[in-house]
Image (spheres, helix red, strand yellow):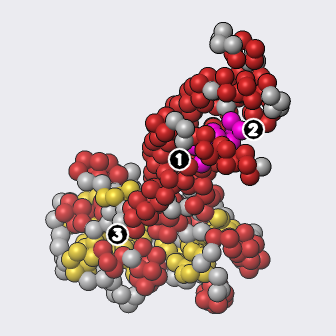
Amino acid sequence: MISRLILAWRSIWRNKKRTYITLASIIFAVIVATFMRGLQLGSYDKMLYDAIRSSTGHIALMDKSFWDDKTMDNSMEFSEDLKQILDQDQKLEFWVPEILGGCLISVGNNTRGVVVQGVDPDKKDAQIRLREKIVEGDYIQPEDQAVMLGKDLASFLKVGVGDTVVLLGQGYMGITAAGTYPVKGIYDHPMADFNRRLVYLPLAAAQYLFFMDGRVSTVNLVLNDTDDIPGETAFYHSKIDTSSMEVRNWESMNQDMLSAIKSDNFFGKIMIGVLYMVIGFGIFGTILMMTMERKREFSIMMAIGMQDYKLITQVVLESIFIAAIGAIVGLVISFPVVYFYSLHPIPITGESAQMYRDLNMEPILSISTNPGYMLAQFGIVLIISIIASIFPLYNIRKFNIVDIIRGRQ
């Protein structure tokens, strides 16, 4: 077998120009496919990371009716016993209690419908690094009776730090919720809806506003390790009153996003498939030319007693050598580029950036460094090379040895 490998290695360099052209096409395909696939998977990871970290968490505790009807009446009791369980759970990175309520926010003649989110300021900062996004004023504290507004909302209302806004909505059990609050801080979030529609209020102040003493809308749990999700889901099922509350995992809360990712992933695979199909024809052409150019050599070898399956094995080894070299070089070139852009995501500017913000996505292009999809490119190229060998190798078995040796073919 070693002698066959040595012979295959030497054979591919007998026509260096042909080999270099084939290698160049494979290397180019691997680089393009790796970068395209990395951007695609990176964007999915970023979307899910943002959704989990800034919104749903890996697991959420809520009233059984809340997910389908997000009203104050479908809130849950947030007991001290539950807080103690959450604080003692070593598998949690952090947990975030929230109150979500729709309100009108008004200053003078300017009024807009907003979502008021009552949060624990420290836990919310751990979740989305909200403190870093403050552009004017200061970050809210747990004891404050003040709000933080998004930059676009503050601009619409024509308010600044220290100005007072009016919140008017419906609280628990249909009680009218109304209050006036000074603006303590203005933040700039990369997601457009946050800047336009989201008002942050300390949790205690929100509970007072909406008459929800001791109650919250949801408790979002972010885990240290995603492998713990099934176990943690079962754990909290055993700790809550399942007749009135439920435990939801992130997949059930992000089904629309997962469906969109699945659809986009399918078309992305088609595009990469087309790219590799083109490369496959290139490999096919190379092996076919190599076979035709060497048919006299092959015929003589078979005439002196070499079995055809050994000759076919020899040609397959040559095609695998070419494919493997091209794939390895392509991956070696791709990895530093992919790694660099994973550390320095590509910023999106101009109108495209605004489009991303309108879709509630941060305007950056992230790239995945998961080794799985990179190694997959290596496997795909090898499979393509073997498939592309089938027809030329079939021709070898059809050679008319006598005619070829005598120069009649």
Answer with left or right where residue 244 lies relative to residue 62. Answer: right
Magenta residues span 313-324
Q: Examine the rendered structure and indicate whether residue 206 appears above or below residue 73.
A: below
The three-letter amino acid code for the residue at tag 1 is Gly
Q: Which residue is mark 2?
A: 313
Q: Which residue is mark 1?
A: 326
Structural distance between the alpha carbons of marks 2 and 1? 20 Å
How many C-alpha atoms fall within 10 Å of the one at disc 3: few (<14), some, or many (≥20)? many
The image quadrant of residue 389 is top right
Count of labels in the image: 3
Which badge, 2 or 1, is on the more N-terminal residue? Answer: 2
Q: Secondary structure at mark 2?
A: helix
Which badge, 2 or 3, is on the more N-terminal residue? Answer: 3
User: Residue 74 at x, y = what percent?
Assistant: 58, 66
- Given residues 408 and 192, the one toward you in this image is 408
**Residue in view at x 40 percent, y 68 percent:** 343
Q: Secondary structure at mark 3?
A: strand
| Residue 199, label in figure | 3
Queried whether the magenta region covers residue 311, the answer comes back as no
Structural distance between the alpha carbons of marks 2 and 3? 69 Å
